[in-house]
Amino acid sequence: MPNSIVIGSQWGDEGKGKIVDFLTETADVVVRAQGGNNAGHTVISAGKKYVLHLMPSGILWPDKLNVIGNGVVIDPMGLLTEIDGLEEKGVSVASDRLKISNRAHITMPYHREMDAYNELQRGDGKIGTTKRGIGPTYGDKVDRTGFRLHDLVGDPTIFAERYYEKAQQCNVIFEAAGLEPIDAEATGKQLIAAGERLAPYTADTVEVLHNELRSGKTFLFEGAQGTYLDIDQGTYPFVTSSNTISAGACTGSGIPPHAIDEVIGVAKAYTTRVGAGPFPTGDEALSDRFHNMGREFGATTGRKRRCGWLDMVLLRYSAMVNGVSRWAITNVDGLDELEEIPICTRYEVNGKQVTLPPAPIAEFESAKPILETMPGWQEDTTGCRSYDELPANARAYLDRIEVETGAQVGFVGVGPDREQTIIR
Ligand code: GDP
Ligand code: IMO
Ligand code: MG
């Protein structure tokens, strides 16, 4: 397999975890390069369900190297909880299987509280964040006041001094707003203890990855979130705080673009979004339908995901900015029962038809989807194991994605299990 980047093409939760787990069989190294534990990637392996937040989905394969790159923001206690949970389920997370960048920024307890505080301040304009402290952590990184993992595992005395000072500054804001202040001393101690446990995993992962690259190993980059949550290309300000598009894999790992062979864009056969912000094809009846089927609840926060029809305007732009070479279209089985399936090919914005998403959020909010209807297949696809076994109308639906976006469909998901993945 070539070196591949797997990214989300919509608003996250496209099924990246499942696709990465599936592709890991033919890779040597699996890398997360952005986001934090706002991500929730569901993998079902040997009948067991795992929800991974910071851990690359390659961890479920015994002989692969997993790397958390410099672009990821790490909540040390959150990561340790995740490691312990995996070990309890019998998954080894030994320090020769997981390497964490010493350049990665740390999400602090005050970042989580600041996230909640910021949301409160936004009132009706709130983003609906996961409250994992992601925005404030990346904010400090860009403001050049953040802490990196080497600060925590390096000299605990220097770390503690800087940490107390920063926590006190945040406490002034929290107390003025009537919120509980952070217990700087207790949380500082917790962090230092967490740093001691994370020390064996901590490495200069740029050096580690380049050694692997030189010895001809195959890389798989696991994106988090999705293209429309990208800080530059998404529905700003209703976005996350990292570059979720394919380019983020390079900046967040230190692997140069010319080492990448392909980009796999993961998209659901319909669209979902969790949190606030525009959603032109959102449809309440479809949301109710999926929720009644027990589908489409957030893997990190348990919130109901908003659901809507497949939006080719989104996929067209995703194909462009990510350089999608192949699509992985998941959850095709979710549409099995429908007689007719609306798809959106263009928006009407300010009385004009457009084929690409508008930049101003007000225009995105007001965009009317121009829908057309495709015939459904009304057959159970969950047992299909080859492209030819798919019903003709399902293939026509997938063909249409290729026509609208100019990228080929390479993989099709017909259920949550690893085996329910078709390679074309
Ligand atoms: P991620 O964040 O992109 O990894 O996606 P999530 O795990 O948050 O959400 C995707 C959901 O869809 C999970 O519950 C997966 O188990 C499930 N899933 C993935 N692919 C398929 C598929 O092809 N069919 C069905 N029915 N479920 C799928
Ligand atoms: P995966 O990797 C879906 C959304 C939040 C909110 C916005 C900002 O599982 O696809 P943040 O906490 O990042 O500041 O929240 O982004 N969001 C996600 N939605 N899947 C995710 O990750 C998400 N990570 C963040 O709901 O709207
Ligand atoms: Mg998810």
Image: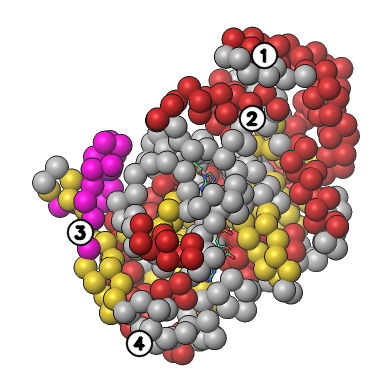
Residue 267 part of the magenta-drawn span: no
Marks 4 and 3 sit apart, C-alpha to C-alpha, by: 24 Å
The segment highlighted magenta reads 353-371
Choose the circle earlier in sequence order: 3 or 2.
Answer: 2
Real-space Cα separation, disc 2 to disc 4, in angstroms: 49 Å
Q: Earlier in the sequence, mark 3 or mark 1?
A: 1
Image location (x, y in percent) of residue 14: 50, 60
Which residue position is annotated with label 1? 171
Is ligand 2 within 8 Å of the beta carbon of the residue shown at mark 3? Answer: no
In three-dimensional space, the C-alpha distance between marks 3 and 2, rounded to whole angstroms, equals: 40 Å
- Residue drawn at x 72%, y 74% is 47
Residue with the mark numbered 4: 392
Q: Residue at x 79, y 45 (%)?
A: 81
Callout 4: 10 Å neighbours few (<14), some, many (20+)?
A: few
**Percent of width and height locating residue 129:** 52, 38
Question: CA separation, marks 3 and 1?
Answer: 49 Å
Q: Is residue 387 left or right of residue 1?
A: left
Residue 370: assigned label = 3
The label nearer to you, 4 versus 3, is 3
Q: Amino acid at mark 4?
A: Ala
- Rounded to the nearest angstrom, the CA distance separating label 4 from label 1 is 61 Å
Disc 4 vs disc 1: which is toward the camera? 1
